[in-house]
């Protein structure tokens, strides 16, 4: 019977060691889980911040686009300008209103005339640019033709070199035995351009 008790005690001790080992593994796993959770939370927080920054930028750009579409003024600015105009109109008398209206028409006419003058200047500049481009292209073509002609003329005027100790041009010299044709590389100079 004492042997059975000893066996049971040994088995209980073995189970306690296994439980302790499993407890330690569980705590290590829990520690790793906590570390990964913390990293995930940090990453998620960073992404939330970036998303907010980007959303703010998008909102700002969209409002700027709306302002540009509406003529560069916010609704508040346009309303303030309109109120100011109405206040000025209310304090003016009929003759003053007519005078202001005529001045506004004159300013509009001046702006139209200036815009037309600028359009004509732009058109003239475009025509001048096109003429300059054509004349430069023609001059470039003429220069290329002159250089090509000068190179051909220089080639024709240059005498063909002769081999040393011979009165025959190198192109008429008899080939050496055992070779198809021997040419002196020093005599084959490129044409002078």
Image (cartoon, rainbow, N blue to C red):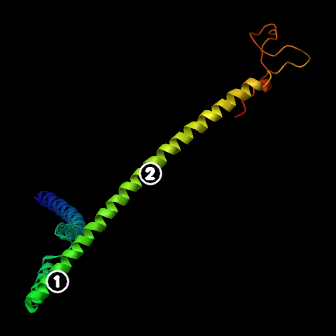
Along the horizontal axis of the image, is 129 left or right of 11? right
Check disc 2 and report the residue beneath it. Answer: 129
- Numbered disc 2: secondary structure: helix
**Picture quadrant where residue 118 is located:** bottom left
Q: Position of residue 184 (x, y in %)?
A: 79, 21
State the image quarter where residue 145 is shown: top right
Q: Residue at x 16, y 76 (%)?
A: 74
Which residue is identified by label 1? 100
Name the residue rendered at 18%, 75% in the picture. Answer: 105
Where in the figure is residue 190, as x and y percent of width and height?
Answer: 72, 29
Disc 2 crowd rating (10 Å Cα; few below 14, some 14-19, many 20+) is few
The quarter of the picture where residue 148 lies is top right
Q: Residue at x 19, y 63 (%)?
A: 26
Residue 58 horizontal/vertical position (percent): 20, 66
Question: Is 78 on the left-hand or right-hand side of 172?
Answer: left
Question: Is residue 178 or residue 90 the one in the foreground?
Answer: 90
Residue 175 image point, x, y percent: 79, 9
Q: Residue at x 13, y 77 (%)?
A: 75
**Which of the image's four quarters has the N terminus?**
bottom left
SS of the residue under disc 1? helix
Residue at the front extreme?
95
Front-most of residues 16 and 183: 183
Q: Does the image show residue 190? A: no
């Amino acid at each position: 019977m004492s042997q059975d008790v000893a066996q049971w005690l040994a088995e209980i001790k073995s189970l306690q060691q296994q439980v302790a080992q499993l407890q330690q593994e569980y705590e290590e796993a829990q520690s790793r889980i906590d570390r990964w959770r913390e990293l995930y939370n940090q990453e998620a927080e960073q992404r939330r911040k970036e998303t907010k920054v980007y959303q703010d930028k998008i909102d700002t750009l969209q409002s700027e686009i709306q302002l540009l579409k509406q003529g560069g003024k916010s609704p508040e600015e346009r309303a303030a300008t309109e109120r100011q105009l109405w206040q000025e109109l209310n304090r003016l008398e009929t003759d003053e209103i007519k005078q202001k209206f005529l001045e506004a028409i004159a300013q509009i006419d001046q702006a139209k005339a200036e815009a037309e003058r600028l359009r004509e200047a732009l058109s003239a500049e475009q025509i001048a640019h096109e003429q300059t481009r054509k004349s430069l292209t023609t001059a470039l073509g003429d220069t290329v033709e002159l250089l090509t002609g000068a190179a051909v003329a220089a080639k024709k005027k240059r005498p063909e070199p002769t081999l040393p100790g011979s009165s025959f041009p190198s192109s008429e010299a008899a080939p050496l035995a055992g070779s198809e044709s021997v040419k002196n590389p020093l005599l084959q100079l490129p044409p002078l351009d």
